[in-house]
Amino acid sequence: MTDVEPPLAGPILDHVVVNVMDRLDPALQAYEKLGFQLTPRGYHSLGSANNLAIFGTDYLELLGFQPGNEGNRADLWRHPPGLTGLVFKGTSPDARYADLLARGVPVEAPAEFTRPVELPEGTKDAHFRVTRISPSEVQNGRTFFCYHYTPDVVWRPDWQSHPNGVVGISEFVIAGTEPARTAAIYERMFGPGLLKAVEGGVSFSAGVPKVSVLTPETIAARFGIVPELGPDGTDHMVALVFKAPSLDVTKAALTAGGVAFADYADGIVVAPALAAGVITAFVAA
C-alpha cells in the first residue's frame, strides 16, 4: 500500500451467491420463472460454473459445478445449498487486505481468477481479484471482497433488464440465534459504529442495500416463512429482498412463470423451494 491509495470505502455490496451445487440447469430455470434474465453459462478458471442476474450496481450469482467437476473448488460445496455468499466491492484490494490484517481480521491472501465471456465483439475474460474472510468467521457461507479488473464485461446494459422489473438488491438477510455475535465480524472488518440495532437483531448499510442479521423468529414473523438454520442450529444466509419500480410488473412476471407468491408487510414473497433454497422477496423501489 502506498500513500497514494484512496481512502477505503465502507461496505458496498458487489454481489450475492446462491450455491446450487450440481443443479445449475434447474436453478437457471427457476430464476427465469421468477422473471430474471440470466447470462449465458460461464466457466471459471478455477473449475466452477455460473449464471448471473445483473442489476444496476450489483448482481446475483447462481454458482455450481458441471457433472464430474465436483472436485474443483470442493470447499464451496461443503456449504449447504442456498444462499452462501455475501460479497463486497473490492476497490483498492491491496489496501483492503492490509487494512483487514491491521484490524486483526482473519483473512486469506488475495487470489485471482478469470471467466471467458462471449460478447458480440468477441470473447473477453472477466478478471477478478478476491480477498476472503477466513471460513472460521462465517458459518455455512462466505464473506469476501471482489475487485473487478473488467467491470464492463460484467455490467452489460443488455443484461440489466429483467421481465420482473428488478433493478437491484435491497436486502441480504442472515438468520442467527445470536445476531450481535454473528454480525461482530462485519464491525471488525469495517470499524466501530457500523451496526445498528433493529427489531430482532442488527443491520448495516452496504451502499444502498442493507445487510440484516435477525433471529429466526423475527424472519418467520416478517416473511411468513420459517428460515432453515444450518447444521446444529448454526447461522445461515436465508433471504434476499429485491427492489423493482412496479410490483404489478413483478407480479405479472411471477404469474407468467407459474410461480406462487404471497403478500407480506413490505411487498411480496416467494417460498425458498421455488428459488433454489432462498426466501425471495420483492419490494417497491
Image (tube, rainbow, N blue to C red):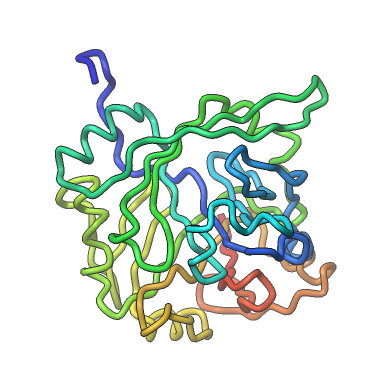
Residue nearest the observer in this picture, 40 or 7: 40
Residue 125 % position (x, y): 65, 27
Q: How many marks?
A: 0
Q: Residue drawn at (21%, 53%), measured in percent from left and top?
A: 187
Direction from residue 6 to residue 159 in the image, left or right: right
Residue 35 % position (x, y): 75, 59
Direction from residue 57 to residue 276 in the image, left or right: right
Q: Residue drawn at (29%, 61%), measured in percent from left and top?
A: 136
Q: Residue drawn at (37%, 46%), measured in percent from left and top?
A: 132
Tell me: residue 157, above or below residue 218: above
Q: Residue furthest top?
A: 4
Quadrant showing the C terminus: bottom right
Direction from residue 237 to residue 137 in the image, left or right: left
Tell me: residue 94, above or below residue 105: above
Residue 277 % position (x, y): 60, 73
Residue nearest the observer in this picture, 248 or 1: 1
Query: Where, by quadrant of the figure, is residue 273 drawn?
Result: bottom right
Residue 24 % position (x, y): 72, 60
Tell me: residue 228, above or below residue 254: below
Q: Is any atom of residue 249 visible in this view?
A: no
Quadrant showing the N terminus: top left
Q: Residue drawn at (38%, 30%), measured in percent from left and top?
A: 91
Residue nearest the observer in this picture, 179 or 205: 179
